[in-house]
Amino acid sequence: MIEISNLEFQYSDAGFRLRVPQLSISRGEKIAIVGPSGSGKTTLLMLVAGVQVAKGGTIRVGNTIISSLNDADRRRFRIANIGLVFQELELIEYLSVRENILLPYLINRAMRLDASATEAARDLAEALGMSDKLDRRPARLSQGERQRVAICRAMLTCPDVVLADEATGNLDSKTANAMLDLLLSQVDERGATLLFVTHDHSLLDRFDRTIDLAEFDVSALVAGNR
Amino acid sequence: MSGTFLLARRYIAFHRGRTGILIAAIALTIYLPMATHWTIEQFHEQSLKRADLTPLIIGAKGSRFGLAIHGLHFRGDVPEPITMAEVDRISDSKLAETIPLFARFSAGGFVIVGTTAEYYRFRGLAVAEGASLQRLGDCVLGADVARKLDLSPGHRLLSEPENLFDLSGPTPLNMRVVGILERQGTADDDVIFTDLQTTWIIRGIGHGHESADDGDHQHKASRANLPQHAEVTDANLSSFHFHGSADKFPLTAIIALPDSEKSETLLLGRYISPDATMQILKPTEVVDELMQIILQARKLIDLGMLLFALATLLLVSLVLLLSLRLREREMNTMFRLGCSRTTIFRLQAAELAIVMLVSVLLAFGIAWGTTRFLASLLQMWIA
């Protein structure tokens, strides 16, 4: 599903360099990514998502070589095929829960906001127990409810790949497990591939595989403070 | 509705407080020059329209602007009096029809205009309620006077003395309101009309008292002992009388209506002499001169407005820049989800466009509403 070979990335201001000689992830695999702060976990996710562009090497997601796409194509590919869950959830405060879930359809004209999308958002919210809060704003939700909205937003387009960047980072163990339960169940249901960045080693046994950026297949040279 | 527009609308609705302040600031910046421009234009138009319809005004020598404003709008300082003899002189010359005006006194805070029936025909004034003047002591009210003083036919209205401390002065006259004029949208709405004789009674030139049959009519001696009538009634109407020669009775202005251009030129020529105690003027010329002064002042106002607009523009730019910084994280989230920089720019532009549109509409609406009132306020200010 995801093939990375000879990946090289360096920020323009230097000080940080990431090298991934080879990494293969199968369809439906659930991967935990760990590593010390500044080892490039988030950067790796952003490279897979096509938000960042590698200096060298290739990243293939499914049949698409991300690293060969131009900006617009990468965005189109990302919004249709990749679900993103952020550490701070990053819900938009002035939108309702429904509109937050539908956000990918509101910000890219490649996505057609029609009745089926609205219905999918409602079904997803219902599956995650949020159907009665669709018209609320994020500020009026509990932390657990906000997480569910973020998962709904990531899953709405039925992505092939879900990238979660320390999505349980600010949560206690119980809440983190509950969120992970929800995410894994949604990923399993859709047969998607999950890359889950975490610092919490107690969660690692929930994944098929763990990639430690410091010790495993991926090597990162840490010279800066990223 | 496009996603961009929906997002922009939601953002504005969510931050309605701060957006409201921004809209108010922009609307005010647009409104002020617009309202000023419209008001001056409207005032110019109204003044010219009334001036155009008034060929010539004759009055005592003095301020041209003062006489024009008095003759057209009955406002400002009352010109020095001229006499009825001038009306006779012009009538005898057959160069123009004359409409004498005596507008020196007031009642209820509104100017009392004594004139003849020709004035009503000349200005196209018609009675909307009640009747026209029937006898001495009657008055008809302009539409605004009736509304503001809450008067209707049958009510009475007491003239105000010129000097409160002059106890020997003429007795205020309690006039009978017999009619209300149709609204004209001109200075005629703001005055009280009566006949010349009634204003001369208010002036003290004529009066009525109990003992009209006093032989040689030694008023100077008997005035103190004879109570004067403070109002005209059917019973005492015949006791009212005037003293002195009618051609010496005062006027404050005369509107002259020459029958031809030649007559107008001849009439104008009669007042050219440097020794003349009276002046004649074409109201259109004076109003144009006045407007030139106002337009000069407007240039300064425009400059001030321009600086004000520039300051607002800079402040709005600062607010937008700060807003962009505050929303950097939100924009970054959108970008990471798959939103293009162009769409983010479009989103910001849509928000700004909505704010600008609402501001402009608000400014237009308020400017339209206030211009109508400001025009009359400006007239008063100039007067």
Image (cartoon, grey):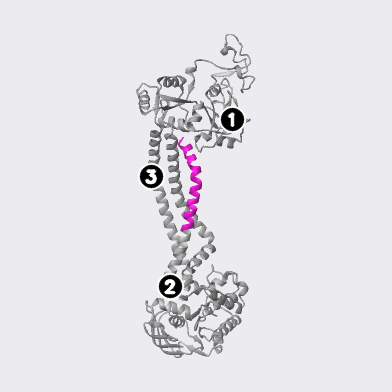
Which chain does the residue under circle 2 lie in?
B
User: Camera-side residue: B374 or B120?
Assistant: B120
- In the figure, A216 relative to B153: above or below? below
- What is the residue that sits farthest to the right in this orientation? B235
Q: Which mark, residue B131?
A: 1
Q: Earlier in the sequence, mark 3 or mark 1?
A: 1
Closer to viewer: mark 1 or mark 2: 1
Q: Secondary structure at mark 3?
A: helix
Residue at horizontal 53 percent and vertical 27 percent from the top:
B105
Which chain does the residue under circle 3 lie in?
B
- Whether residue B153 sits left or right of residue B105 in the image: it is right
Q: Are marks 1 and 2 on the same chain?
A: yes
Q: Amino acid at mark 1?
A: Ala
For disc 3, the marked residue is: B299
- Number of residues whose C-alpha sits closer than 10 Å to that of mark 1, classed few (under 14), some (14–19) or many (20 or more): some
Residue at horizontal 45 percent and vertical 79 percent from the top:
A78
Q: Start and end of the magenta stretch? A: B356-383
